[in-house]
Image (tube, rainbow, N blue to C red):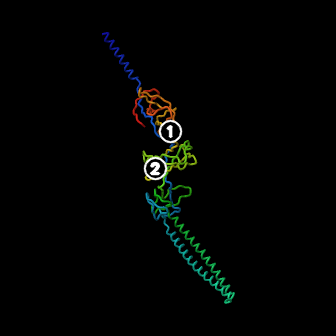
Amino acid sequence: MKRTLTLALLLALAGSAGYWWWNHREKPIAVQLARVERGDIQQTVTNTRAGTLKACRRARLSPSVGGQVSRLVAAEGQRYTAGQILLELWNHDLQARLQLAQAQQASSEALQRQSCTQADLARREAERQQALLQRGLTSDERAERSQGEARAQAAACDAARANSRVAAAEVRVAEAALEHSRLRAPFAGIAAAVNVEVGEYVSPAPVGIPSQPVIDLIDDSCLYIEAPMDEVDAPSIRVDQAVRISLDAYPGRFFEGRVRRIAPYVEDREKQARTVTIEVDLQRPEDSERMLPGHTADVEVILASHPDSLRIPTEALLEGQAVYVYDAGDGRIHRVPIKTGIGNWQYTEVIDGLEAGQQIVVSIDRDGLDDGVRVRPEKSEDR
């Protein structure tokens, strides 16, 4: 009986010890791994806020005079050629003034022809009388009278010409007044918005006060990206540097571009980082065929490029230039210092400290990770 109790006590103690060991054993931490590999790597800087795809030319149009819309040609989504009338205000009075000015011009031109014809006849008569005087066939008085008449008719011709020029100027003034009542396309483009209807009254915006345009015309044949860059990154950006462009509307696709302009000042917006705006042209015009002005765009300005370099995912990099290297033999990770080169948000170049094929931890935010800790790979893949 005593032996049985002793055996039972030993078994209980062994079970308790096993239970304690089971609960206090080292549990491996689940981590995600990536393989150190060779590949191309670029040093880039990206925009701090979303960039915008813009048209090279965009005009928010409104008539320069007020009036009632009598004819509306423009329709949203339709294309128009340069100089085409988009809208016309009621202008019957201006058309009548133009017709009056044109009639007065025609009358002035007719009077000019009459006066100048008479001046030509008077000149020839004076020349004839002068010839007769030299031959003694006419009197001095008659010759002088014919010369005076010729000078008077020449002056009348000059006056008629001046009146014709005045009449022509009045026609141009009337044409300009009539043109003010018409809104024309300053360039070929598409009407993005039309904010008026036939019969409505429009008035010109007061100077210095922004107002809604009557017609918003966009030249979508030429597009570029405007993006704000952090003021810290701006000094490293140069005109004509290569750029990689991505648009939310085309996920997974990248487009080539070039920096065409860098703003010569730092923009300071309330509650936002100070930025320098850059403009980027698309390298291939065909890329913009289905893009729309206003699309959200992100740009990566490529500062340097190293082909076939040893690289790791940037997310695996620890403070102090180190990574956790996974040892498949003992299932533990080891903190290894490395020397890095260029990098971007996706990859960082490794100059020294690692070899191709090694596996490193990329989920460095997991609790409990430290040098020598046992881990359990969740996923091991070439990234």
Question: Can you identify the residue that label 2 sits on?
Answer: 295
Vertical placement of 90 versus 265: above or below? Answer: below
Tally of numbered tags: 2
- Judging from the image, what secondary structure is the residue with disc 1 in? strand
Q: Nearer the viewer, mark 2 or mark 1?
A: 1
Q: Nearer the viewer, residue 128 or 51?
A: 128
Is residue 122 found left or right of 23 in the rendered image?
right
Q: Of label 2 and label 1, which has the lower sequence position?
A: 2
| Residue shown at 53% from the left, 73% from the top | 102
Q: Is residue 336 visible?
A: yes
- Mark 1 Cα within 10 Å, few/some/many (few <14, many 20+)? many
Q: Nearer the viewer, residue 344 or 88?
A: 344
Q: Residue furthest front?
A: 308
- Spot occupied by residue 223 in the image (x, y as percentages of width and height): 48, 53
Q: Residue furthest bottom?
A: 137
Question: Can you identify the residue that label 1 sits on?
Answer: 343
